[in-house]
Amino acid sequence: MVSPVTDVEVSGARESSLSAVSWGPIVAGAFAASTLTVILMLIGSGLGLTMVSPWTGASASAATFAVSAAVWLVVVQWLSSGLGGYLAGRLRTKWVGIHDDEVYFRDTAHGFLAWALATLLVAGVLGSALSATVGAGVQAASNVASGAAAGATSAATNAASGTTDGNTLGYFVDTLFRPADTSTVAPAGQNDAGVTAQASRILVASAARGEVSAEDKTYLAKLVASRAGLSQADAEKRVDSVLAGMEDAKNKAKAVADTARKASATFALVGALSMIVGAFIASIAAVLGGKQRDEDEARFVRG
């Protein structure tokens, strides 16, 4: 009669001392997937640059460019994941004495591990570029939330020193004090820097508040009337026109920032979805590679 201790010993002898994870094929598949990803990303960058041109009307639309980039990202992820998973399954050694379901599970796990390692490798190589892309949307949203106050403050500093020509706010201030009779424009050196700086500070404070108070608007109109030689009514019309132009410029800047935010969000979501599908493809490819490897060996043995 066999003792229970002997049964345990026999059962333990049947357990393999080797790990079920073959890191060699996993690393090989991961390196292959990473290399293919870098190559395809470079190709995609080259194709993307052909769609962009500094000439007006020569570039593809923003929507077309975004869709093309998203599609290419999906293609890159799927192709590289398929290659890495297939190599991880095809290069592993044959597992003997285990059930087919266990072989299927191990091949699936090997494909997934190859995909995970490749993802980490690519993140290390392209991590800075990816962070810059996603961070652009976050920065744009932050700029919109903070408003125009920061940029206007810098402009006001320049205006106070008499150097308003090189910034957008300086342009609006110059528009305020443009003489009605342009044939009598005074040389730039004769401009009243104090009045210009005062108007700049009013515009800065108004931009920070989001509106121009009636008192500030009336005072601006008086400054414009005295500097540009206009009547009070015409000066008020000019102030209203300039304020409307500033509001339009601010709205356009918000629209650009919002577009960048949406593009970054879409890129992140599409990237995450493509990676999930890539993990699935890598797992299935490893199963196919492992199955083909076992079938080829079986045919070789029979032959």
Image (tube, grey):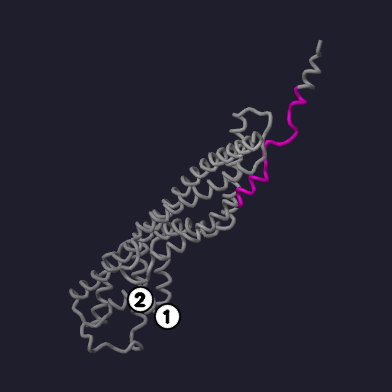
Q: From the viewer's side, name the closer residue of 137 and 19.
A: 19
Q: Please name the predominant secondary structure of the magenta segment in the image.
A: helix
Q: Is residue 29 magenta?
A: yes
Where residue 152 appears, x then y in whole percent?
A: 39, 69
Above/below status of 199 relative to 97: below
Type of amino acid under label 1: Ser
Q: Quadrant of residue 89?
A: top right
**Residue that numbered label 1 is attached to:** 161
Specify the label residue 259 is tagged with.
none
Specify the label residue 170 is tagged with.
2
Q: Quadrant of residue 236?
A: bottom left
Type of amino acid under label 2: Gly
Question: 92 left or right of 147?
Answer: right
At 53% across and 54% down in the image, what residue appears?
Answer: 37
Q: Residues within 10 Å of mark 1 (few under 14, many from 20)?
A: few
Where residue 192 appears, x then y in whole percent?
A: 34, 84
Judged by depth in the image, the label closer to the viewer, 1 or 2, is: 2
Above/below status of 69 relative to 59: above
At 68% across and 46% down in the image, what residue appears?
Answer: 24
At 42% across and 77% down in the image, what residue appears?
Answer: 158
Where does the magenta region start and end? Answer: 11-31
Location of the N terminus by quadrant is top right
Above/below status of 83 relative to 144: above
Question: 301 left or right of 59?
Answer: right
Kindly indicate whether the residue at mark 2 contacts the one at mark 1 (C-beta within 8 angstroms): no
Q: From the viewer's side, name the closer residue of 283 and 227.
A: 283
Location of the C terminus by quadrant is top right
Q: Is residue 112 magenta?
A: no
